[in-house]
Amino acid sequence: MKNFMDENFLLQTETAQKLYHEHAAKMPIIDYHCHLIPQMVADDYKFKSLTEIWLGGDHYKWRAMRTNGVDERFCTGKDTTDWEKFEKWAETVPYTFRNPLYHWTHLELKTAFGINKILNPQTAREIYDECNEKLSQPEYSARGMMRRYHVEVVCTTDDPIDSLEYHIKTT
């Protein structure tokens, strides 16, 4: 049986594996639809926690959490801690199996943080603490992560009336 999240994750055929490993994996990322906040990139922002970077504005995760019966205050509320919000996400993740959110979560854990564990309520605290420790390091800043992923171009989804001052600052 094929391992979950191995080096050939989602690569079902030999041809797919060859194309990815010998060609696509070496290519830079050109992101045509990104929800990054331009000021965070311009300022090379250091994220305070995994909750901030993962749940701070992710309406996809919020929708899954709401569907799972999680109270709104754990999605967008201000009266809960980052840990409490993350814990509710960890409780939701097992219910996203067969949904791209499940795969994205584990791909991000693996590629950004080197974590191969499955996120669930039992592993949540360990994963949260390990990721937060890494986020405190300079290479985990907004630009540091873009360098790690070999991001060459980012096209943000700003409001059409935004001033673009932070886009200009980063060029």
Image (spheres, rainbow, N blue to C red):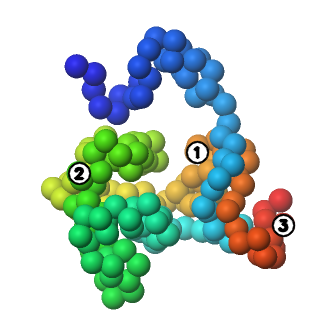
Q: Within 10 Å of the Cα at label 2, are there few (<14), some (14-19), or many (20+) other Cα atoms?
A: some
Of the image marks 3 and 1, the number of the one nearer the N terminus: 1
Is the residue 40 above or below the residue 141 in the image? below
Q: Nearer the viewer, residue 43 or 160?
A: 160
Is the residue 76 above or below the residue 40 in the image? below
Q: Residue furthest bottom?
A: 79
| Label 2: element kind | helix
Residue at x-position 63% and y-position 21%: 23
Amino acid, disc 3: Ile
At which x and y percent is residue 156? 69, 60
Query: Disc number at residue 148?
Result: 1
Is the residue 108 above or below the residue 69 in the image? above
Q: Nearer the viewer, residue 62 or 9?
A: 62
At which x and y percent is residue 45? 60, 68
At which x and y percent is residue 157? 67, 62
Reading the image, the residue beneath label 3 is 168
Quadrant hosting residue 34:
bottom right
Of the image marks 3 and 2, the number of the one nearer the N terminus: 2
| Label 1: element kind | helix
| Alpha carbon distance from label 3 to label 2 | 41 Å
Mark nearer the viewer, 2 or 1: 2
**Left or right of 52 in this view: 23:** right
Circles 3 and 1, Cβ within 8 Å, touching? The answer is no
Amino acid, disc 1: Arg
Residue 54 in view: no
Mark nearer the viewer, 3 or 2: 2
Amino acid, disc 2: Pro
